[in-house]
């Protein structure tokens, strides 16, 4: 099956692979959508995972034929539960990343935009960081 761009529309070639046929219990809200560069990175990870899977596929297909339907159901159940766990971890990581961005923004506002000049010094007394006000003061003094 091909789309208008000549790419395959087969499920195994999609970013979601065969998992797109299973209901996803964790719905993504619009705030959880990834920026294009993150989506590209995830697609690249997906492609690497697919390549690794294909490398091991030949030997595992022979073993797959010898498994009972009950064993296959159990394996599918375990895979689905693991997928849900990963989705939950992903959601938690996104929340932590959002909190980290909020803390960074607060730090930026408190430190870099402060009306007083601030510097962060090393133990040897070297300036490691300075806020914008300190930089403007040094520039005005001709020390910059």
Image: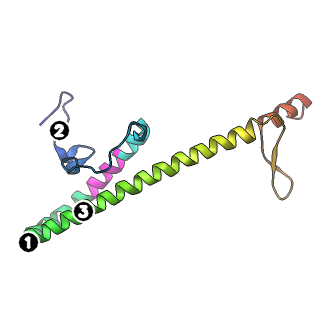
User: Could you say which quadrant of the image residue 108 lies in?
Assistant: top right
Read off the residue under disc 1: 68
Q: CA distance from mark 3 to mark 1?
A: 17 Å
Q: Are marks 1 and 2 in contact (CB under 8 Å)?
A: no
Residue 79 is labelled as 3
Disc nearest the viewer among 3 and 2? 3
The kind of secondary structure the magenta stretch mainly shows is helix
Give the mark nearest the N terminus, 3 or 2: 2
Give the mark nearest the N terminus, 3 or 1: 1
Q: CA distance from mark 3 to mark 2?
A: 24 Å
Is 48 magenta? The answer is: yes
Is 108 magenta? The answer is: no
Q: Residue at x 30, y 62 (%)?
A: 82
At mark 3, the secondary structure is: helix
Read off the residue under disc 2: 9
**Location of residue 89 in the rendering, given as x and y in whole percent from the top left corner:** 41, 57
At mark 2, the secondary structure is: loop
Q: Are marks 3 and 2 in contact (CB under 8 Å)?
A: no
Would residue 32 appear left or right of 71 to someone viewing this image?
A: right
Report the front residue among 85 and 133: 85
Q: CA distance from mark 1 to mark 2?
A: 31 Å
Image quadrant in which the N terminus is located:
top left
């Amino acid at each position: 099956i091909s789309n208008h761009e000549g790419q395959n529309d087969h499920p195994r070639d999609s970013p979601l692979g065969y998992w797109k046929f299973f209901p996803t219990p964790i719905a993504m809200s619009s705030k959880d959508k990834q920026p294009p560069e993150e989506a590209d990175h995830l697609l690249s990870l997906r492609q690497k995972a697919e390549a690794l899977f294909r490398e091991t596929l030949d030997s595992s297909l022979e073993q797959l034929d010898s498994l009972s339907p009950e064993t296959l159901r159990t394996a599918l159940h375990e895979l689905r539960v693991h997928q849900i766990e990963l989705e939950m971890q992903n959601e938690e990581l996104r929340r932590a990343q959002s909190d980290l961005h909020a803390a960074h923004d607060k730090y930026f506002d408190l430190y870099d935009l402060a009306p007083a000049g601030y510097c962060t010094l090393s133990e040897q007394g070297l300036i490691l960081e300075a806020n914008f006000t300190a930089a403007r003061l040094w520039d005005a003094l001709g020390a910059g």
